[in-house]
Amino acid sequence: MSFLIGSGEGHQLGGRFDVVVRVRAEQTGGVMAVIEETIPPGELITPHTHRNDVWVHVLSGEIGVLVGEETATAGPGAWALKPRGILHAMWNSEAIPARIIEVLTPGGTERWFEETAALQPGDAEGFRASCQRHGIEFFPDSPWLRKLQERYRL
C-alpha cells in the first residue's frame, strides 16, 4: 500500500461530473474514501440521503448546499458537511464549473460512483439497484427540488 497519491493518480471515471476516485476504502481500512469531481454549471443533485457522512471541500467555483432545512453557499477553501441520514442536495448556480473533493466516512460509497459510471445511459434499474446496495435514496418528489430549481434558476 502506498502512502502517497500523486496529483495525476486515481481511478478516472469521467462522465458528466468528471469523477476521480483518489482514495479507496481499502487503502484506509474502510475509515474513509476520497473522490474529486466537477459540478457543471446549472447542475442540481436531487435531494437524497445516504448512510455515511460526506465532507465537501470546494477547490474552485462555488456550490450551494441544502442540509435538512438549511441552505448555504460554499466557495473556494470552504468545507460543508452532508451528514448521514439527513436529506441534502448540492448544486452549482454559477456560470463556471465547481471542482470539489468529497471525503466519504466511512469509505465504500466510492463503489457507487464506479458502478453508476459504468451503467448504460437510461439504465434506471441498474441505478436503483446500485443505490439500494450502497444505502443511497433519492427523493425526486421532495418539495425542495422545485424550490431549489426556482430559487437558483437550475
Image: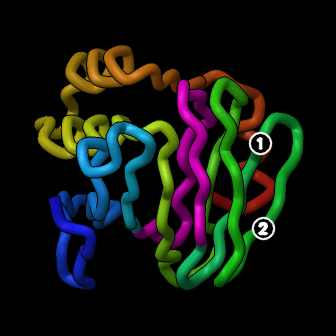
Say left or right for 39 vs 78.
Answer: left
Q: Which mark is residue 119?
A: none
The residue most toward the right is 70
Task: Out of 65 and 1, give the one closest to the viewer.
Answer: 1
Q: Is residue 114 left or right of residue 76?
A: left
Residue drawn 21% across and 22% down?
Answer: 126
Based on the picture, tell me whether residue 43 belongs to the magenta stretch: yes
| SS label for mark 2 | strand
Seen at 28% across and 23% down, the residue is 130
Residue 65 lies in quadrant? bottom right
116 or 22, nearer to the observer: 22
> Where does the C terminus fall, quadrant-wise?
bottom right
Position of 75 relative to 24 (above/below): below
Q: Is residue 93 magenta?
A: no
Instruction: Identify residue for label 2.
Output: 73
Label 2 and label 1: CA atoms lie apart by 11 Å
Residue at screen point 51% across, 42% down: 105
x 47%, y 25%: residue: 136
User: Is the image coloured rainbow, by chain, by secondary structure, or in one colour?
Assistant: rainbow
The residue closer to the viewer here, 59 or 42, is: 59
Which portion, as a residue range, is magenta? Answer: 38-57
Amino acid type assigned to the residue bearing label 1 in the image: Val
Callout 2 crowding tier (Cα within 10 Å): few <14, some 14–19, many ≥20: some
Which percent across, then down, holds residue 107? 40, 40
The answer to whether the residue labelled 2 contacts the one labelled 1, judged by CB atoms less than 8 Å apart, is no
Label 1: which residue?
Answer: 67
146 relative position to 59: left or right: right
Dominant SS of magenta comes to: strand
When the figure is inspected, residue 129 is found, relative to residue 22, above or below; the finding is above
Q: Amino acid at mark 2?
A: Thr
Q: Earlier in the sequence, mark 2 or mark 1?
A: 1
> Is the N terminus in the top left, top right, bottom left or bottom right quadrant?
bottom left
